[in-house]
Amino acid sequence: MDYQISVAGSDIAFRCEETETVLDAAERVGYAIPYSCRKGVCSTCEAGVIAGTASSSVQGRIEGPAEQVLLCCLCPTADLTIAPRRIEKREPAARKTLDMTVYRVTQPAADVSILQLRLPTGVRAKFRAGQYLQIELDDGSRRNYSMANPPHESDSVQLHVRHVPGGRFSEGMLRGLDKGHKLRVELPFGEFSLQEASTKPAILIATGTGFAPIKSIVEDAIKRKLDRPLYLYWGARRLEDLYLRELAEKWANSGRLHFVPVLSDPQREWSGRCGFVHEAVLEDFGSLDGYQVYACGNPSMTSAAHATFTQAGLAEDDFFSDAFVHTDQAA
Ligand SMILES: Cc1cc2nc3c(=O)[nH]c(=O)nc-3n(C[C@H](O)[C@H](O)[C@H](O)COP(=O)(O)OP(=O)(O)OC[C@H]3O[C@@H](n4cnc5c(N)ncnc54)[C@H](O)[C@@H]3O)c2cc1C
Ligand code: FES
């Protein structure tokens, strides 16, 4: 059985199976709605339900009118009228499931590994800078990792994985991975990409391995000679946690962007910026009216950045984030 999903204030309408999420159905017919985790954790896909009833795997029964409904977990039980934050026409997602081969694992910091995966011969990865992939684990569960390479390097992918204590993938499987191992991967996912239509200066903020999609975005912007001011703020506890600091400094020295490293617990002599990375941005810019912000990494940072920046004049539509949430984090 399927139902009609109508988008309030527009003539957009599409069909959605009762077993399908509204987010999946929208993508299937070529509409992009903002999302990040697809697991009911990050709130990026929040929307209003104006009318109709539905069932949510994380919020239970929904009856319109209702606010803050997560479209990634919502299956209709009647025709629905929804009010997403944004919806735009997009080519239907051409996702591929592939067996990729590990060809290099390096460890640039005590708790970060860089994993290089090669695609099958003759196959190219098609994605936008800033998107992520899903690795299928042997128990069938999946983990999300952002591509750190730019899209034009399409015969392989580079992932930056932070070791989470007790983590099934990031400590368990990763430790046993060696050259030649195969990983089943699906890509691409995500809406965390530089908005092409805007010429506003972009402030890119990362904590830890949140640097991965930012690296892809910056290298893509350099390759395509995008003429748009870029400011990169990268936060970590200590200097050694900024595991590719020389690369960010190289971008800055070539005049392509402004780079500000921010340490929350420097421990050694450090004459640079200290504190929380989003606070350093606020100190430097004061008002964020007229900017776009792309924040990625620790969910506490992305939500603090969203709350404080929108108070400091940033338009709601000019904030984009990928919060590296995990499955047991409550919505
Ligand atoms: C859109 C998206 C993109 C992502 N991209 C990246 C990326 O590029 N690089 C990257 O390193 N990670 C990324 N993540 C996080 C990643 O998907 C995994 O959640 C993370 O690596 C943990 O997986 P695991 O199997 O090692 O741990 P699990 O086995 O899932 O968890 C083990 C235990 O650790 C806890 N835990 C898991 N993650 C964290 C955490 N971050 N902080 C504190 N406790 C935690 C869990 O609650 C659990 O108790 C991304 C997440 C999302 C939603
Ligand atoms: S994408 Fe729906 S809650 Fe994260």
Image (cartoon, grey):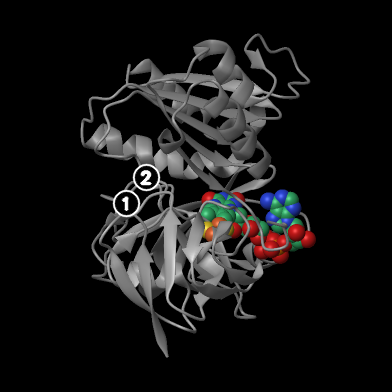
Q: Badge 1: few (under 14), some or many (20 or more) residues near its Cα, within 10 Å?
A: many
Contact, CB < 8 Å: mark 1 with mark 2? yes
Q: Quadrant of the N terminus?
A: bottom left
What is the x, y in percent for residue 300? 68, 40
Q: Does residue 94 show up?
A: no
Report the image quarter containing ligand 2.
bottom right
Q: Badge 2: few (under 14), some or many (20 or more) residues near its Cα, within 10 Å?
A: some
Residue with the mark numbered 2:
193
In front here: 173 or 4? Answer: 4
At 32% from the left and 57% from the top, the residue drawn is 127
Query: In front of the other: label 1 or label 2?
Result: 2
In front here: 3 or 293? Answer: 3
**What separation in Å lies between label 1 and label 2 (alpha carbons)?**
7 Å
At 68% from the left and 13% from the top, the residue drawn is 270
Say the numbered circle drawn on residue 217.
none
Query: Quick check: 130 left or right of 264?
Result: left
In front here: 74 or 179? Answer: 74
Residue with the mark numbered 1:
128
Query: Quick check: 147 left or right of 73?
Result: left
Q: Secondary structure at mark 1?
A: loop
Query: Quick check: 298 left or right of 294?
Result: right
Q: Does residue 331 show up?
A: yes
Which residue, as the protein is rendered here, is positioned at the far top? 271
Q: Secondary structure at mark 2?
A: loop
Which residue, as the protein is rendered here, is positioned at the far bottom? 1
